[in-house]
């Protein structure tokens, strides 16, 4: 199978803060990346400093930021699911799982990156991570991609152990930083900690 990375996260900026360096390194080595972004982060609280967004303009602004960040990282294929921000856990799961399953069958990724259900802090992260795992589980064993799950709950290492994938992203730190700046409405209030530009960690998830 050709290499292809499929990324599934709910919010514009999850791809950047969580794994922008890893994705930039994949892109640099010519591996295609498809990103399924669940929402446009339209319920976000950050409206810029000073305010440059309001409740009406925020989704458009965050969509433009997302596209700019994807360009910086080298993500060429972006699929927007159009779900409502902060409500994924209350959605009917079946249509979402089916849509992700369809994309999995089309794209045939060798690797999927998503959030680790239960250990990714925000309910949208946990919900969409869980739906992605369900979609992968519907594929036959030989068609299943490897899944790297991203976790950052405070207690996660106590429960699920240390991450088995720790990527040195220092060679892509400048790209990740550019992508962080592209998410202007978010990065103004969430400047990167130093280690965010050095390492990114994942847990290989065993789908049942
Ligand atoms: Zn998020």
Image (cartoon, rainbow, N blue to C red):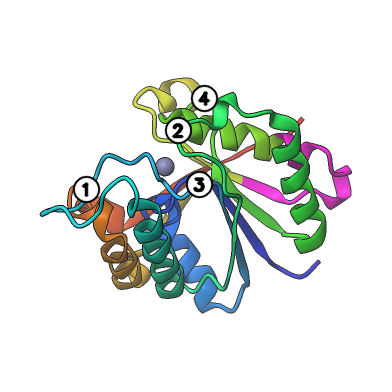
**Residue 46: x, y in percent?**
24, 45
* Mark closer to the observer (3, 1): 3
Q: Dot 2 surroundings within 10 Å: few (below 14), some, or many (20 or more)?
A: some
Q: Which residue is mark 1?
A: 190
**Quick one: SS at disc 4?**
loop
Q: Which residue is mark 2?
A: 86
The answer to which of marks 3 and 1 sits earlier in the sequence is 3
Q: Quadrant of the C terminus?
A: top right
Mark 3–mark 2 CB contact (< 8 Å): yes
* Mark closer to the observer (3, 4): 3
Instruction: Tell me which segment is drawn in magenta.
Output: 134-147
Q: Which residue is mark 4?
A: 118
The answer to which of marks 4 and 1 sits earlier in the sequence is 4
The answer to which of marks 3 and 4 sits earlier in the sequence is 3
Q: State the CA–CA distance, disc 2 to disc 4.
A: 16 Å
Q: Which residue is mark 3?
A: 39
């Amino acid at each position: 199978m050709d290499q292809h990375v499929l990324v599934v996260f709910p919010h514009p900026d999850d791809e950047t803060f969580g794994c922008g360096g890893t994705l930039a390194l994949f892109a640099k080595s010519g591996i295609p990346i498809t990103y399924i972004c669940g929402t446009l982060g339209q319920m976000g609280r950050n409206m810029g400093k000073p305010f440059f967004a309001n409740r009406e303009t925020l989704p458009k602004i965050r969509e433009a930021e997302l596209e700019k960040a994807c360009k910086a990282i080298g993500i060429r294929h972006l699929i927007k699911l159009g779900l409502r921000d902060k409500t994924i856990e209350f959605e009917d799961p079946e249509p979402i799982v089916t849509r992700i399953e369809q994309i999995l069958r089309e794209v045939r990724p060798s690797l999927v990156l998503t959030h680790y259900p239960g250990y990714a802090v925000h309910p949208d992260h946990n919900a969409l991570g869980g739906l992605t795992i369900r979609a992968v589980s519907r594929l036959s064993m030989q068609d299943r991609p490897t899944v790297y799950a991203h976790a950052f709950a405070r207690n996660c290492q106590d429960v699920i152990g240390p991450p088995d994938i720790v990527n040195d992203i220092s060679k892509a730190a400048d790209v990740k930083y550019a992508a962080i700046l592209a998410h202007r409405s978010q990065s103004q209030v969430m400047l990167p900690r130093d280690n965010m530009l050095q390492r990114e960690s994942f847990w290989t998830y065993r789908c049942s």
